[in-house]
Image (tube, rainbow, N blue to C red):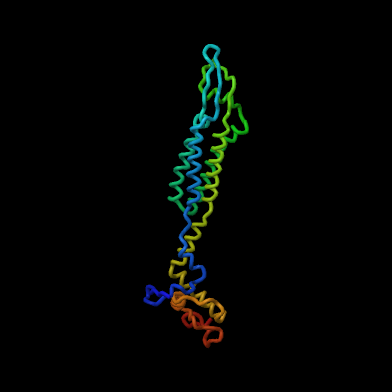
Amino acid sequence: MTADEDDTGRSVDATDTEVPGAGATAAPAAKPIVPVALLALAAAGLWASSRMTWVTVYSADGLTEPRTDDLNGGVWFGALTPLALVLVASIAAVFAVKGVLRQLLGVVISVVAAAAAVPGFALAVGAGRTADRAGTLAELPVRAVVSSADTHLGPAILSIAAASLALAAGILLTRRTGERTEEVSDRYDNPVFRKADASAAVSKQNAETGTAAPLSDRVLWDALDAGTDPTDTPDTPGADRGPAGENK
């Protein structure tokens, strides 16, 4: 077994059992890899959908040849491309904030996702006056009459799928699993908390009279520093005396 020395020069056996829960120091805080990946896919999906044809409108004015206009997602829903850029910017924001701010960012992303899903859903279910809206967006002459308008569900469904990915990312960001792990790690990196936990672990082992797993040298030294004698047991004279020899 390899042994190291702590900051006081005492030997520490790295293979012995540590204080319960102290292993959290070795576990790094969880990185928001999954939410970031979802945001990247969502942004790419919205951008691709904004470049695809959502509606094809056919019109005639009685004087010239019939006219055909293809309206892409960026024209049909002008905020589609900006929302994709918002999701891209949110990727950087995820790494820039933590804790409550990251949770609030998750809420904002969820709202953006809901807004991005509305036009695609409306087009898919045929809500609204599609032909009239198409004629307005195509900037037809006043005398022109819209004869028909064909909708393309593929791009609309793609925008809904991308919005769903963004919504999932927003929900994941509202959780603070990584921050909780980091907080636990910080607790056991603090000498005050570490000594208090070591003292509690030694006291528990003494009360169990040898039935618990052996503790490491580092834990025993921390307990001594806190005033708890690892040799005290219920059968040991003076075991009823607390830290620093005070009566309990």
Whether residue 219 is situated above or below residue 173 in the rendered picture: below
Which quarter of the picture shows residue 61?
top right
Q: Residue at x 50, y 38 (%)?
A: 46
**Residue 234 drawn above or below residue 168:** below
Q: Residue at x 52, y 14 (%)?
A: 65
Farthest residue to the top: give it. Answer: 63
Count of picture labels: 0
Does 60 appear above or below 111?
Answer: above
Report the quarter where the N terminus lies: bottom left
Q: Name the spot of residue 218 as percent of width and height, x first.
A: 44, 75
- Provide residue 113's location: percent of width, then percent of height: 54, 41
| Residue situated in front as seen by the camera: 246 or 124 | 124
Return the residue nearer the eye: 122 or 108.
122
Locate residue 124, reporting x and y percent: 60, 33
Q: Is residue 119 visible?
A: no
How far across and how far down the image is residue 147, in percent?
Answer: 59, 19
Residue at 49% x, 43% y is 41
Q: Residue at x 37, y 73 (%)?
A: 7
Query: Farthest bottom residue?
Result: 237
